[in-house]
């Protein structure tokens, strides 16, 4: 018997590159967990400094801290983040939270994220807008909500050309 010439050709309808990418990308929950761990560790270092420099006196008096004071505290937080995570970020593309949860930052080809090419853009987009009163908070909310995109990449991931994957 001969083959039916009118039978449609068989082909895969799933894009293998997309399905492989989705199986490697870190889950939203794991990324949230890593961020919470990093935030808690930062609080352990930054809160005593804020107390020492009188941040809480402004709050208890119902006053808004001066802009330069808030900017200084923000820059101090960024400095502590760098001190705590620089070596891990350069070596493995991880923060402490990411290391604990077995995820890491890589470029779009899955290679180690480079400091100048990727990480400075990524964390610059993450930290610098937060220093702008009101608008920084709105930007940060939008940044975080981008995690619900299909590719699970926030604005800081897009800016840095990075993605977060399982180790």
Image (spheres, rainbow, N blue to C red):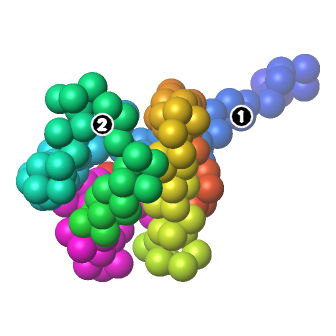
Q: Quadrant of residue 112?
A: bottom left
In the displayed image of the protein, which residue is found farthest to the right?
6
Q: Nearer the viewer, residue 26 or 55?
A: 55
Look at the image and tell me whether residue 137 can be seen. Answer: yes
**Mark 1 nearby-residue class (10 Å; few <14, some 14–19, many ≥20):** few
Residue pictured at 28% horizontal, 44% vertical: 35
Q: Quadrant of residue 98?
A: bottom left
Residue pictured at 62% horizontal, 56% vertical: 159
Question: Element at badge 1?
Answer: loop
Tell me which segment is drawn in magenta.
Answer: 82-107
Q: Is residue 97 magenta?
A: yes
Q: Quadrant of residue 10?
A: top right
Look at the image and tell me whether residue 46 can be seen. Answer: no
Q: Which mark is residue 11?
A: 1
Q: Is residue 9 magenta?
A: no
**Mark 2 nearby-residue class (10 Å; few <14, some 14–19, many ≥20):** some
Quadrant for the C terminus, please.
Answer: bottom left
State the predominant SS element of the stretch in magenta: helix
Q: Disc 2 to disc 1, how far (Cα)?
A: 38 Å
Q: Is residue 128 above or below residue 114?
A: above
How many discs mark residues in the rendered view? 2
Residue pictured at 30% horizontal, 36% vertical: 32
Instruction: Tell us which disc is closer to us: 2 or 1.
Output: 2
Q: Find residue 147 and report its horizontal and vertical position in percent.
A: 49, 34
Q: Find residue 20 and report its horizontal and vertical position in percent.
A: 49, 46
Sequence-wise first label, 2 or 1: 1
> For this view, does 45 lie left or right of residue 88?
left
Q: Where is mark 2, residue-wise?
A: 32
Q: Find residue 37 and report its horizontal and vertical position in percent.
A: 17, 46
Q: Nearer the viewer, residue 6 or 123?
A: 123
Question: Element at badge 2?
Answer: helix
């Amino acid at each position: 018997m001969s083959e039916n010439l009118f039978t449609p050709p068989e082909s895969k309808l799933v894009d293998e590159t997309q399905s492989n990418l989705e199986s490697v990308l870190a889950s939203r929950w794991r990324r949230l967990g890593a961020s919470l761990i990093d935030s808690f560790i930062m609080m352990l270092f930054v809160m005593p400094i804020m107390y020492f420099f009188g941040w809480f006196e402004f709050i208890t008096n119902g006053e808004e801290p001066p802009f330069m004071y808030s900017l200084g505290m923000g820059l101090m937080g960024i400095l502590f983040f760098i001190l705590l995570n620089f070596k891990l970020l350069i070596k493995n593309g991880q923060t402490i939270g990411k290391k604990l949860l077995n995820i890491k930052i890589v470029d779009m080809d899955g290679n180690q994220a480079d400091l100048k090419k990727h990480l400075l853009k990524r964390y610059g987009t993450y930290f610098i807008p937060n220093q702008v009163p009101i608008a920084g908070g709105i930007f940060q909310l939008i940044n975080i909500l981008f995690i619900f995109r299909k590719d699970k990449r926030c604005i800081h991931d897009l800016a840095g050309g990075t993605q977060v994957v399982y180790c």
